[in-house]
Amino acid sequence: MAEYSQRDIMALDRQGNYYSRHLSAMTGEQLHDKSDIAAELAWRDAKIDQLRAHLADIANPITKLQREASESDCKLDGHQARILANDAHWLQDLARLALIDTSK
């Protein structure tokens, strides 16, 4: 599959003014050179990858704990990771409860 395909720019604008907004910004910032545009796209791809990794950490705290332990040369087995993850979930639940308005 090609990296760049023909896009429905009208549909993109209907969804959130994506195309026109970027076209206007690129023109205003004088991003006319392919290299300048590629640099901007690369920066955004890196940011998207960071956000995806953060989302994965939120979705699976055990994997995050194991990765952080290995990065700091610590040993963290699956049992320890599950205990810590359960504690983290308990704290998240507690924080959510604190935000619930019980006056209604």
Image (cartoon, helix red, strand yellow):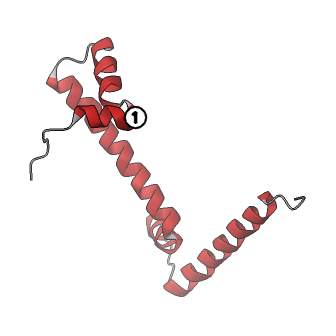
Position above or below: 59 against 87 = above
Quarter holding residue 15: top left
Tell me the kind of residue under disc 1.
Gly
- Which residue is found at the position 81% from the left and 61% from the top? 98
The residue most toward the right is 103
- Which residue is found at the position 76% from the left and 68% from the top? 94
Position above or below: 68 against 35 = below
- Left or right: 85 as drawn, with respect to 10: right
Task: Check disc 1 and report its element: helix, strand or loop.
Answer: helix
- Left or right: 47 as drawn, with respect to 26: right
Q: How many marks?
A: 1
- Read off the residue under disc 1: 16
Nearer to us in this view, 50 or 14:
14
- Crowding around mark 1 (Cα neighbors within 10 Å: few <14, some 14 to 19, many 20+) is few
- Which residue is found at the position 28% from the left and 37% from the top? 11
The residue most toward the bottom is 79
Position above or below: 90 against 20 = below
In the rendered image, residue 84, in percent from the top left (x then y), is placed at 62, 76
- Which residue is found at the position 25% from the left and 30% from the top? 39
- Left or right: 76 as drawn, with respect to 32: right
Q: Quadrant of the C terminus?
A: bottom right
In the rendered image, residue 83, in percent from the top left (x then y), is placed at 62, 82
In the rendered image, residue 67, in percent from the top left (x then y), is placed at 44, 68
Position above or below: 12 against 75 = above
Nearer to us in this view, 98 or 64:
98
Quarter holding residue 81: bottom right
The residue most toward the left is 1
